[in-house]
Amino acid sequence: MGSIVPIIILAIFVFILLAASVRVVNEYERGVVFRLGRYVGVRGPGLILLIPFIERMVKVELRVVTMDVPQQECITMDTVTVKVDAVVYFRVIKPESAILNVEQYIRATSLLCQTTLRNVVGQSELEDLLAHRDKINEKLQAIIDESTEPWGIKVSLVEVRDVQLPDNMQKIMAAQAEAERGRRAKIIAAEGEAQAAEKLAEAAKIISSQPAAMQLRYLQTLVAISSERTNTVVFPLPIDLIGPLMNKPGSDQKKLT
């Protein structure tokens, strides 16, 4: 019985050593290894063996991280207060830099995105923020990516999701949009009147060059009016149209007699 106790103690000691030395790193992870506090390299993926109590490993994910930027209250260049939020897509490309150069790289990236979002919106006008959001996104991505490069982080995409305006500004913009639509409607109506006047002038020139065309036009108008259900129709009839009917041969014979 006394000989079993040392075996059990030895087995426990071996188990502790294996637990302290064996690590498994997934395909989408890398392990940053430190030996007595000194960086010695990046390992993985697969089974990693460490020197117990001497080496230590920190895992870093290489997958794309989707991070929400909390809503920020900003003042645009034209002094309009807006609330803006965004989403950022980034990934770690240098695990050693993400561990050695910055503490808590995800939190640091989040804070950087918040301050950069406020700065970029403050340097932009409201019209650019609403109508040219793609330029704002590209500017944000370039600034954040340049700032996180020493941390071994690559920012692939930044998207401004929502822009909230004050209630009074929404009413002003709605009135402005309505006025703009009214202005466009008047311009279109005026252009239509101008085109119609041009066509009428062309038609008048053609009709004036052909006297018979005027008579045919009167007859067409008479046919159109006759289809209306009205009691009385007053239609002007030119003398030139009925002149040939008045000069009958019988009337000439009466005048001679």
Image (cartoon, rainbow, N blue to C red):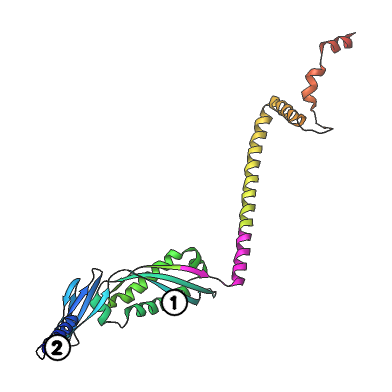
Q: Main secondary structure of the magenta part?
A: helix
Neighbourhood count class around disc 2 (C-alpha, 10 Å): few under 14, some 14–19, many 20 upward: few
Residue 193 location (% of width, % of height): 65, 45
In-image side of 21 versus 186 (left or right): left
- Up the image or down, 253 lies above or below 137; here it is above
Residue farthest to the left, as pictured? 3
Q: Which mark is residue 119?
A: 1
| Left or right: 179 in relation to 141 | right
Residue at image mark 2: 9
Q: In which quarter of the image is the N terminus?
A: bottom left
Question: Please, which residue is most extreme toward the bottom here?
Answer: 2
Q: Amino acid type of disc 2?
A: Ile
Quick check: 126 left or right of 248? left
* Residue 43: quadrant of the picture: bottom left
Range of the magenta residues? 161-180
Give residue 24's position: percent from left, percent from top.
21, 74
Q: What element carries label 2?
A: helix
Give yes or no for residue 105 being in the magenta stretch.
no
- Whole-percent x, y for residue 110 in the image: 38, 77
Residue drawn at the location 46% of the way across and 72% of the way down: 85
Q: Which of 209 and 6 is in front in this view?
A: 6
Q: At 64% across and 56% down in the image, what residue appears? A: 182
> Image quadrant for the C terminus?
top right
Q: Nearer the viewer, residue 63 or 179?
A: 63
Q: Which of 125 and 116 is in front in this view?
A: 116
Task: Name the secondary structure under disc 1.
Answer: helix
Disc 2 or 1, which lies upstream in sequence? 2
